[in-house]
């Protein structure tokens, strides 16, 4: 059987043995295209049947460079980094892995960022190492009795975050999600409100919505201005949900208590980005999804989607659906 190439754009996992084991029996070979390669010309030379990608963008030009391409496979949930229309225009599937169990890791991370900020874990750690024993007087820590939690997005991760934040005794949980099951929310004692209401009332706001045209900069300067100076904002979803410059300014001017940020509009984040020097800001490098368990499941499920398409089936989690038939068949 002739080898079909499956391209991994800017590989980032320790190895690709999981994918190789699933795809080799189908005559497919995994080929890495590195960060320093010219992606368009490498893809043109390789002409892969599938592209596997993590956070890096996949542009129309890269899709156009691959005449045999059948699938762009996103390792993870968000597909905002793939030019969906360019793929759809050519009848190329875009699929993701929404069910690799990342809701456990990502919701843990949201809570970890909240606690780090609320309890000043990072700054007190630095202070102790610098022999700066401030013990209660050095930095403000407001109490959170009777505090209100706000969740923007109540899907897999938002619901799991609600469950975990629940142990901190928030007086109320306000939810913004136009598609959430209102009956389920009511059963769990939660309330749907407008995003402006969440910004005005919540003491802790955690973002769990996808990045879509309508959610880009959903937290902008006007909404930051509505927040209380004691509010903590957590973003483990997508950087583009927040106007980062406006957030850095609000933090600098102490109009917001703190921000926990795992995701940035541009990744890796620029070392001069103003959020890196903003006060009471705890940052991580888009790692909320990660654990050894979640990575293995993610790599396996992504490879299984490629296998489905190579076998002439539709991907299970097909994201750029077009009307009509099942799309292209595999030559
Ligand atoms: P999901 O699809 O289960 O939930 C998303 C929720 O957002 C849905 O309930 C949807 O109704 C809601 N939503 C859509 N438009 C909205 C809007 N305008 N306002 C409010 N809510 C809206 O997805 P999920 O698995 O919970 O993941 C959520 C996001 O988390 C992903 O899209 C991804 O961007 C991000 N994510 C980040 C990491 C990480 O490592 N940081 C890992 C996985 C996922």
Image (cartoon, rainbow, N blue to C red):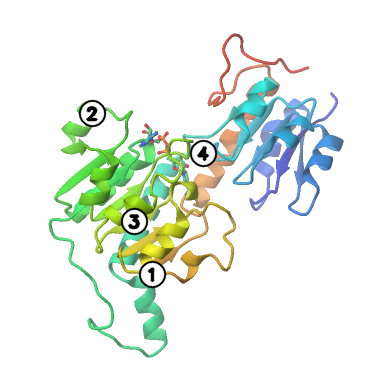
Tell me the tag on residue 252: 1
Residue position for label 3: 233
Q: CA distance from mark 1 to mark 2?
A: 37 Å
Tell me the tag on residue 260: none
**N-terminal of the two: label 2 or label 3?**
2
Judge whether 86 appears above or below 123 on screen: above
**N-terminal of the two: label 1 or label 3?**
3
Judge whether 309 appears above or below 325 on screen: below
Q: CA distance from mark 2 to mark 4?
A: 24 Å
Is the residue marked 4 within 8 Å of ligand 1, measured from its CB? yes
Residue position for label 2: 182
Question: Residue 104, position in %: x, y?
Answer: 39, 46
Identify which residue, 322 or 34, lies in the foreground.
Answer: 322
Contact, mark 2 vs mark 4 (Cβ under 8 Å):
no
Q: CA distance from mark 1 to mark 3?
A: 14 Å
> Which residue sits at x=31%, y=56%?
225
Q: CA distance from mark 4 to mark 1?
A: 30 Å
Q: CA distance from mark 4 to mark 3?
A: 20 Å
Identify which residue, 205 or 220, lies in the foreground.
Answer: 220
Image quadrant assignment for residue 233: bottom left
The residue most toward the bottom is: 131
Would residue 92 be found to the left or right of residue 274 on screen? Answer: right
Residue position for label 4: 78
**N-terminal of the two: label 1 or label 2?**
2
Contact, mark 1 vs mark 3 (Cβ under 8 Å):
no
Judge whether 17 appears above or below 26 on screen: below
Q: Is residue 242 visible?
A: yes
């Amino acid at each position: 059987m002739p080898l079909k190439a499956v391209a991994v754009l800017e590989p980032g996992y320790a190895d690709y043995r999981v994918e190789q084991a699933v795809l080799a029996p189908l005559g497919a070979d995994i080929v890495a295209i590195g960060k320093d390669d010219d992606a368009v010309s490498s893809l043109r030379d390789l002409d892969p049947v599938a592209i596997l990608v993590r956070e890096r963008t996949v542009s129309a030009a890269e899709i156009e460079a691959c005449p045999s391409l059948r699938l762009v496979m996103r390792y993870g949930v968000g597909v905002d980094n793939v030019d969906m229309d360019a793929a759809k225009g050519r009848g190329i599937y875009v699929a993701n892995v929404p069910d690799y169990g990342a809701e456990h890791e990502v919701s843990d991370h949201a809570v970890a960022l909240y606690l780090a900020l609320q309890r000043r874990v990072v700054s007190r750690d630095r202070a102790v190492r610098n022999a700066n024993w401030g013990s209660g007087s050095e930095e403000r820590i407001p109490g959170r009795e009777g505090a209100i939690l706000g969740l923007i997005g109540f899907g897999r991760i938002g619901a799991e975050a609600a469950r975990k934040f629940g142990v901190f005794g928030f007086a109320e949980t306000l939810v913004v999600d136009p598609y959430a099951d209102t009956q389920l929310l009511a059963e769990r004692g939660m309330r749907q409100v407008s995003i402006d209401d969440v910004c005005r009332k919540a003491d802790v706001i955690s973002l769990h919505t996808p990045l879509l045209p309508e959610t880009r900069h959903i937290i902008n300067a006007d909404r930051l201005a509505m927040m209380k100076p004691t509010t903590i904002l957590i973003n483990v979803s997508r950087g583009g949900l927040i106007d980062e410059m406006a957030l850095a300014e609000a933090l600098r001017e102490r109009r917001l208590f703190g921000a926990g940020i795992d995701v940035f509009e541009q990744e890796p984040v620029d070392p001069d980005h103003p959020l890196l020097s903003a006060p009471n800001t705890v940052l991580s490098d888009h790692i909320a999804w990660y654990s050894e368990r979640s990575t293995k499941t993610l790599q396996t499920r992504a490879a299984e989607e490629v296998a489905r398409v190579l076998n002439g089936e539709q991907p299970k989690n097909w994201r750029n659906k077009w009307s009509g038939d099942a799309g292209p068949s595999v030559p």
